[in-house]
Image: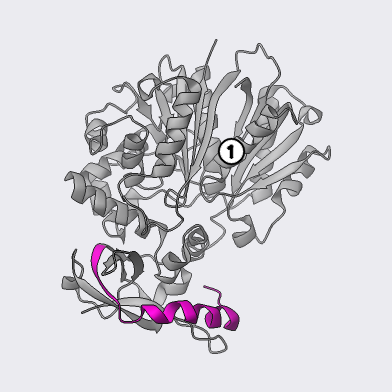
């Protein structure tokens, strides 16, 4: 693919009561324009990733609403794919550029969650589950708790082993000035935190977050050192309900999308030096490492505990931003935030959390319980 | 969950044939932080059960004790109220599991 990222923007992630959904999106969009040194008139189309604005904010038609900010009457598209809404928006933006319909496109992911109560948000998020799961009173922590129980049983992994994932991501998040949580935690902290859905505890779970992120991609030839290439963008889907799947310890949508992405980019998992993966829950990151080919089945937590995925000690650094767990998870923004983080890392602009000599990065964005997965591979060719 | 008389009427045809079917617990969790509709029921277990015909179903476990939360516990599908509603709303019934 001949597509480059030429601009990025991202708000601080967190509990941001002073700003609205539009404030967040506008801030990220303005930053992306400034970073790319483009003007609004240079943008051919806008793709928006968001899951909950119609449910929580009573605001549909978000594509047109955000296009007003650019002010040029460009085509605008709203993309929803649960927590993978951002990744799906980017995938469709890429397709529009590859088709020749557009040359330079902005993609923004945004979510405003903390204006609402936790139980209302939990109910809204369950819109991404199956009807049977909703009728059962299941929640997403509960659905991932099923996976955790199956994984622990199959591989002899303990709750303490899974807790090491949250510990790593908080360590990384402590270096990220835009992260929701900038403090370190211990395995004991995770184990002592309140239970949400057994065996998952509060510190196994990503938080409720406000935030936005935006990028600008182009097919035009650019010589800027800020240019990062997108070498693969692949999507796959699976059943919405978890119960009918043949396995609970792997997500087939991830395996399929990753296999296609590695093939398109002409690389293998061993070539990846840095990855942003969808750690909505600690168990989700363990499964991600294995589905992406970073670790053998059942070995992900061992590799994490040995420091192989940690800045400073690892050879393949996972979630240098702090991941969803520490950086935060404004669901529609997460897929774009992952791309912003990888772009900054591949440019060498990540400051205290910079991964040395990173040239190839992977983003893994998942919707629902693995209902849909989006894999992007980015490369610094300079 | 927002249900209407029409959705309740349509779903009863799908629900009725399941009543009385048995299976065994494959996976379980205990929901302690529920969504808005289930607050008055928490904590409550939700299970994935493997039914006698080999299908897998997800559902809430009712009439449970702590010792029922184990793999391979035999459970049966029963008809129960989904969750409490306002006085003006319809009462919606769904399939749940109970230990046998």
- Name the chain under label 1: A
Q: Which residue is rendered at x = 45% and y = 54% of the image? A: A239
Looking at this rendering, what residue extends furthest in the right direction?
A72
Which quarter of the figure is the C terminus of chain A placed in? top right
Q: Is residue B18 magenta?
A: yes
Q: Which residue is rendered at x = 29% and y = 68% of the image? A: B53
In the image, A194: left or right of A340?
A: left
Q: Which residue is rendered at x = 49% and y = 22% of the image? A: A265
Quarter of the rendering containing residue B15? bottom left
Quarter of the rendering containing residue A10? top right
Residue B97 rendering spot, x and y as whole percentages: 30, 76
Please determine whether, in this image, residue A360 is positioned above or below residue A93. Answer: above
The reply to whether residue A345 is visible in this rendering is no
Residue A294 rendering spot, x and y as whole percentages: 32, 29
In the image, B90: left or right of A280?
A: right
Task: Return the residue nearer the eye: A270 or A123.
Answer: A270
Q: Secondary structure at mark 1?
A: loop
Residue A349 rendering spot, x and y as whole percentages: 52, 20
Which quarter of the figure is the N terminus of chain A placed in? top right
**How many numbered marks have been drawn onto this rendered protein structure?**
1
The reply to whether residue A58 is visible in this rendering is yes
| Image colouring | one colour
In the image, B13: left or right of B75?
A: right
Q: Which residue is rendered at x = 36% and y = 26% of the image? A: A317
Query: Neighbour class for label 1 at 10 Å: few (<14), some, many (≥20)?
Result: many
Which stretch did the figure color magenta?
B1-26
Looking at this rendering, what residue extends furthest in the bottom direction?
B87
Q: Is residue B24 magenta?
A: yes
Residue A328 rendering spot, x and y as whole percentages: 46, 44
In the image, A194: left or right of A156?
A: right
Q: Which residue is mark 1?
A: A11
């Amino acid at each position: 693919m001949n597509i480059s990222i030429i601009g990025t923007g991202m708000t601080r992630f967190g509990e941001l009561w002073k700003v609205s959904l539009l404030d967040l999106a506008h801030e990220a969009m303005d930053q992306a324009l400034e970073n790319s040194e483009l003007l609004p008139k240079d943008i051919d189309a806008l793709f928006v990733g968001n899951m909950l604005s119609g449910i929580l904010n009573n605001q549909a038609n978000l594509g047109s609403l955000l296009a007003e900010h650019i002010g040029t009457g460009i085509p605008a598209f709203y993309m929803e794919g649960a927590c993978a809404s951002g990744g799906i928006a980017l995938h469709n933006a890429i397709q529009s550029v590859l088709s020749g319909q557009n040359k330079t496109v902005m993609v923004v992911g945004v979510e405003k969650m903390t204006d609402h109560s936790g139980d209302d948000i939990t109910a809204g998020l369950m819109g991404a589950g199956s009807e049977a799961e909703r009728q059962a009173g299941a929640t997403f922590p509960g659905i991932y708790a099923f996976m955790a129980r199956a994984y622990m049983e199959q591989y002899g992994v303990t709750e303490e082993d899974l807790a090491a994932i949250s510990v790593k991501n908080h360590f990384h998040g402590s270096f990220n000035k835009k992260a929701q949580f900038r403090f370190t935690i211990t395995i004991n902290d995770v184990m002592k935190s309140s239970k949400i859905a057994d065996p998952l505890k509060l510190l196994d779970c990503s938080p409720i977050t406000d935030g936005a992120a935006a990028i600008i991609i182009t097919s035009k030839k650019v010589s800027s050192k800020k240019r990062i290439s997108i070498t693969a963008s692949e999507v796959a889907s699976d059943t919405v309900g978890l119960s009918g799947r043949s396995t609970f310890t792997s997500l087939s949508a991830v395996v399929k999308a990753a296999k296609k992405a590695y093939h398109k980019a002409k690389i293998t998992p061993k070539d990846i030096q840095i990855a942003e993966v969808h750690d909505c829950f600690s168990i989700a990151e363990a499964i991600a490492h294995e589905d992406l080919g970073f670790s053998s089945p059942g070995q992900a937590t061992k590799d994490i505990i040995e420091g192989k995925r940690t800045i400073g000690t690892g050879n393949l650094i996972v979630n240098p931003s702090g991941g969803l767990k520490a950086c935060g998870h404004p669901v529609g923004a997460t897929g774009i935030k992952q791309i912003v983080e990888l772009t900054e890392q591949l440019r060498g602009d990540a400051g205290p959390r910079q991964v040395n000599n990173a040239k190839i990065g992977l983003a893994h964005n998942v919707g629902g319980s693995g209902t849909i997965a989006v894999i992007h591979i980015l490369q610094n060719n300079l | 969950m927002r249900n209407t008389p029409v959705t309740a009427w349509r779903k009863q045809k799908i629900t009725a044939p399941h009543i009385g079917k048995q299976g065994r617990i494959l996976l379980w969790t205990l929901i302690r932080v529920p969504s808005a509709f289930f607050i008055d029921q928490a904590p409550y277990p939700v299970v994935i059960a493997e039914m006698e015909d080999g299908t897998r179903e997800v559902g809430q476990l009712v009439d449970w004790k702590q010792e029922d939360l184990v793999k391979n516990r035999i459970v049966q599908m029963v008809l129960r109220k989904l969750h409490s509603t306002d006085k003006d709303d319809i009462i919606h019934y769904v399939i749940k599991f109970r230990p046998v």
